[in-house]
Image: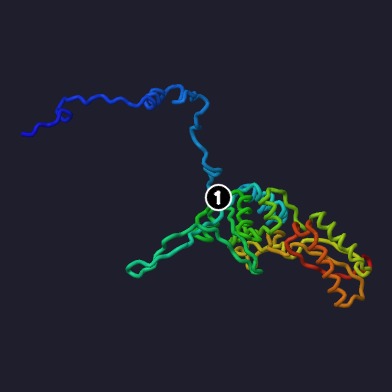
Amino acid sequence: MVKKPASESPGAELPEKQLPGHIAAALAGAGGSADSAGQPWAGRDLPAQEKYHNFDTDDGAMDADFAAAVADLAAGDGTEAQVVAALAKARVFIPIVAQVAETTVGENGLVSDKESDMALVTLQGPDGRTALPAFSHAEALARWHPEARPVAVYAARAALSAVAEEAQLLVLDPGSQRPFVVRRPAMWALAQQHQWLPSYADPAVVSVLEASLAALNNPSVVGISASAGVGVKSQWDTGSTASGRMVQGGGSGPELCVTLTLLPGLDQPSINGMLSLLQDFWAGSEVFAQAVDSVQIRLRHPTPHS
């Protein structure tokens, strides 16, 4: 018969081991009024429910103020400036999709993904400019790209992402019945959390135009003015009627119409040279460059009563 060691015999007691002094002291203080360094626990409690991000209770619906501004624009009672102002305080969703970074070929000859990254989705507009899509509510994003992951951010953060991606436009709810394009000046204002004023309603832009007319010093050019361009308008509700309806905002541009009033008698080469000088003046103005996304020019002759 093999005899068991004393430590394994029934009823045998193990010898008591002594802990190192610093560990024993730390354990002795555990659960007391102070930590192991003698610092009191009072005033150091974490909140019962930690807030991990700004959208813990988000139901994915459209922001109420943004929805109201969009409804006013559709009814003809609002402006695109009011829509952008409401957007500045709203939460939106940016679509993120998986993108294969590296593939590998297995022993069976099949290609599989070795690494993948999550990437922002960008779009290319008809004029070649890059646009970042964003969505006012989760359902709109799911309809547009069912496989995209919605990331909730404030619109200012979405605008910063657009700038980082070198996008010139931010497009709200593409593919929906009410898409809204935020052009470069408004997008930069959102990113910097500044109030945005459309170029066609900006007194600083009018001042630049008047200064350019004075610098031109051509007696045949008797007036210059700014108004909303044809590109300000966008078509909404195309699914409810045959052709939808045009609203005064959300178009991709040109958003500024510069009207020049000319006296009769100028030939085409003279007009072309005059326009070139004016455009060089506008391009050299920092105010104009920051406030204006794109321009259309309209020439008119004064009427007898103007």
Q: Nearer the viewer, residue 108 or 204?
A: 108
How packed mark 1 is, by other alpha carbons closer than 10 Å (few <14, some 14-19, many 20 or more), is many
The image quadrant that residue 274 belongs to is: bottom right
Which image quarter holds the N terminus? top left
Residue at 36% from the left image edge and 69% from the top image edge = 110
The image quadrant that residue 15 belongs to is: top left
Residue at 32% from the left image edge and 69% from the top image edge = 108
Residue 172 in the figure: left or right of residue 207: left
Q: Amino acid at mark 1?
A: Ala
Q: Nearer the viewer, residue 117 or 207?
A: 117
User: On screen, 51 above or below 230?
Assistant: above
Residue 90 visible at all: yes
* Total tally of numbered discs in the picture: 1
Q: Nearer the viewer, residue 29 or 157?
A: 29
| x then y, percent, for residue 184 | 69, 58
| x then y, percent, for residue 57 | 52, 43
Residue 60 in the figure: left or right of residue 84: left
| x then y, percent, for residue 278 | 84, 66
- Residue designated by label 1: 152
Which image quarter holds the C terminus? bottom right
Q: How is the image coloured?
A: rainbow
Residue 5 in the figure: left or right of residue 165: left
Q: Secondary structure at mark 1?
A: strand
| x then y, percent, for residue 132 | 60, 59
Residue 178 visible at all: no
Q: Nearer the viewer, residue 247 or 239?
A: 247
